[in-house]
Image: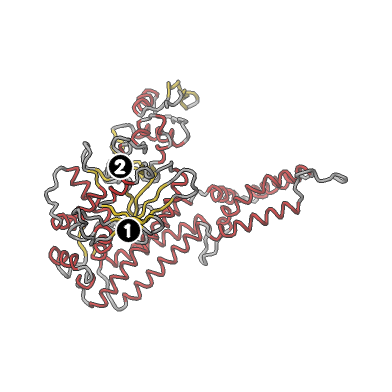
Amino acid sequence: GKGKGKGKGELSFSELMKLGQQTLTKLKDEGERSIVTEFLEEWKKVKGQIEAVEDLSKNIELPKDVEAKIAKIKTDMRKFYKFVEAKYGLDGGRALSWLTYVQIFKPVVVAIGPYTFVYFSRNGYLLLYLLGFALIIFLIWTTNQHQIVIEFINAWRGTHDSELEKYMKKLRKFYDTLRDFAALQNQLRKARTFDVRSILEENKGARDFWIRHFGASTHSVPSSQMIDALLHSNKQTHLVGKQTIDVIYNTIAKIIDKNGDGVISAIEILDFLKYFGPIDKCVDRIKSSLIDERSNEGSRLYPWFTWRSKDRIELEKLMKRYATDGDFVVRCSSQGGFAVTVWKEGYKIPSHMRVYYVPETKASPDGRVRPFYIEEGGGKAKKFFQSLAELVSARKSDLKQAFMDPETVAYFSISGTPFTVQASLFMGKRDCDTYLGRYFDPSVDSSSGFPRGEFWNHSQVGHSKKDPIFMDRNPAAFNVILNWYRYGGKLYVPEGISRILMEREIKFFRLPIECIHERERGMLKISFKAASK
């Protein structure tokens, strides 16, 4: 009112607007990097690569299987774009709707909203503030614009962002695949008729290997046939034990099949040999670097090796949220060779260490070949290693335990009914000593160096639809168990599931629940006990 001075520490309206302007300026760059903008950039890159491949196709015909893959990429891209149109309001001209900017301005509202509320309340405008808000709600309600409210809430919560990030990851893979196709076209253009020698001309060992096993006119071969040929060439056909054979087959397939289509091309062989070549030593180098054969439980793939499952940016986001001091992974580096990404307590982002690889390294005086090395002292010194495993062991003071990806998808078959969930659903309950909490426990057993959770120690079981985690339990009750994890330890048991059945399932999955009371108004009443530590 009149005569009232501005109290100490109180913001004037002009100061409030100034604060808002500063906040908006700081958020400008962030807005330019919104998730939809990132998607459009990736989408344009892939579209440009498709156009480049199609231009080359006017003169050089691609193999039929490659053309089919390009057609599939186009179909998926249309699907991704329609998703963005539907969920983010992107129109045909690629203009971003107001929904896109909700996440950008969310920090502004969160930062300035309380100040605005305090300003109005101290200057007698609180009632006007509330009436204005009520009027907006009334207008939306009376004009039947309920969908706008729902869309706003979804945009505010970022409901669709995780799905869009998955699509962006696929777009990056599409881009790499299309680049390989363009490289193949360039080679075909030189040769005019397909001859693998034109693609492998710079790698004599790989060229001779391919011609000897598959013939010069063969464009690609099934991954199982390729792995058999590699084992034979590396004199590794004496492998004993189903687990050892499975681990080696699956590890090589994971690395060599860049496109994940079950077929290996000559270009994929060249890419593979950049990391584990030469051709006559690749299997041995994979075994020594990535597979632990000393365990009493049989051969196992080291859990810290992620290859291309996550790139640098994706790892940084995940580690900021989930990692503890000393968590690390070894991955493929976009600059060639490998990289070790490690989280250190007190740092805002993970640190990255480049690992160089020289395939044709000669043996040192002690007779050992050390093709891997890192730079120390600002690049002034190099330290060499026989394998990635030896490097990790030498740096164990910093590299304490493998970072287990919480976004790993877990597949279940509950008496034949499929369930698909993210591993993070159970990792947050590791202290509860539940059955699934232990099964997905990412903490490291100091004696073995591997995670305690059984899920992480099996390269196949639960990691694909073809080989799910099978349990002979009740599917409807299992869904209730999953909801206990989803909703912060609250159990909701719908009608149709009996008290006795639920008690048995709770006991099997070791949920910290003492008893189930009788139904009241259609729902079972639940009592809890404290989770064990």
Residue 235 as seen in the image, left or right of residue 429: left
Mark 1 surroundings: few (<14), some (14-19) or many (≥20) residues within 10 A: many
Location of residue 213 (image quadrant): bottom left
Q: Secondary structure at mark 2?
A: loop
- Give amino acid for label 2: Gly
Towards the viewer: 254 or 270: 270
Location of residue 383 (image quadrant): bottom left
- Residue receiving disc 1: 356
Percent across and percent down for residue 338 are 33, 56
The reply to whether the C-beta atoms of the residues labelled 2 and 1 are less than 8 Å apart is no
- Give amino acid for label 1: Tyr
Percent across and percent down for residue 373 are 31, 56
Quarter of the image with the C terminus is: top left
- From the viewer's perspective, is residue 172 above or below residue 447? below
Q: Residue at x 31, y 41 (%)?
A: 456
Q: Secondary structure at mark 1?
A: strand
Q: Residue at x 18, y 46 (%)?
A: 245
Cα distance, mark 2 to mark 1? 33 Å
- Residue receiving disc 2: 462
Q: Residue at x 40, y 60 (%)?
A: 171
- From the viewer's perspective, is residue 428 above or below residue 530? below
Percent across and percent down for residue 473 are 31, 32
Task: Give the mark, 2 or 1, whose residue is nearer the N terminus.
Answer: 1
